[in-house]
Image (spheres, helix red, strand yellow):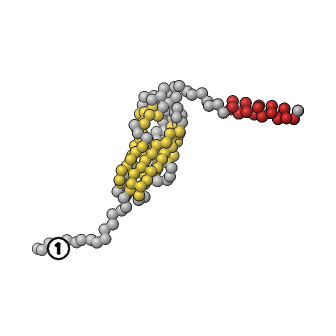
């Protein structure tokens, strides 16, 4: 008897778990973020050079796109993104500033959270920052004769 109750409880738990594990229905009208590129390659940058870039995207869905957050993988990249809804067919940009005071190769990610059909999108910046130029000696021109 106890065994039958135990088996029945186990089957009930499996059945309930399968119902709860089903994916939510997909909204066919959901906004869609379509990027020109999901990777920005700075190439080689001078130390303390311009670390700004932009990721342009278009809402190719049928409903307004609302970006709720953009988070960088470290404090060396600072994103700014549109706070207002992006209408269907409209384009916008996510601006990124990388701290070029850090020498060496880098590859950093930014995670975008929105109401799009793909609610979490990862974009990437990469490149290499050269070390600062050091001048060991100063050459002074001789005085000009009068």
Q: Determine if residue 136 is in view.
A: yes
Residue drawn where x is 42% and y is 51% of the image: 98
Q: Is residue 118 above or below residue 135?
A: above
Q: Nearer the viewer, residue 137 or 104?
A: 104
Residue drawn where x is 46% and y is 49% of the image: 108
Q: Position of residue 114 (x, y in %)?
A: 52, 37
Q: Is residue 47 above or below residue 53?
A: below
Q: Quadrant of residue 3?
A: top right
Q: Determine if residue 64 is in view.
A: no
Q: Quadrant of the N terminus?
A: top right
Q: Position of residue 19 (x, y in %)?
A: 69, 30
Label 1: how many Cα within 10 Å (few below 14, some 14–19, many 20+): few
Q: Quadrant of residue 59?
A: top left
Q: Position of residue 49 (x, y in %)?
A: 36, 55
Furthest-right residue in this view: 1
Q: Which residue is mark 1?
A: 143
- What count of labels does the image hold? 1
Q: Quadrant of the C terminus?
A: bottom left
Say what secondary structure mark 1 lies in: loop
Furthest-left residue in this view: 146
Residue 80 horizontal side relative to residue 2, left or right: left
Q: Position of residue 20 (x, y in %)?
A: 68, 32
Q: Nearer the viewer, residue 11 or 42?
A: 11
């Amino acid at each position: 008897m106890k065994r039958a109750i135990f088996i029945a409880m186990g089957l009930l738990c499996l059945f309930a778990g399968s119902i709860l594990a089903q994916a939510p229905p997909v909204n066919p009208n959901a906004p869609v973020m379509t990027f020109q590129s999901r990777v920005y390659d700075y190439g080689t940058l001078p130390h303390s050079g311009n670390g700004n870039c932009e990721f342009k995207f278009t809402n190719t869905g049928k409903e307004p796109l609302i970006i709720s957050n953009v988070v960088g993988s470290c404090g060396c990249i600072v994103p700014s993104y549109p706070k207002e809804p992006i209408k269907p067919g409209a384009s916008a940009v996510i601006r990124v500033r990388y701290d070029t005071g850090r020498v060496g190769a880098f590859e950093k990610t930014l995670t975008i959270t929105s109401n799009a059909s793909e609610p979490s999108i990862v974009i990437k910046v990469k490149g290499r920052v050269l070390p600062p130029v050091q001048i060991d000696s100063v050459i002074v021109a001789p005085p000009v004769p009068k």
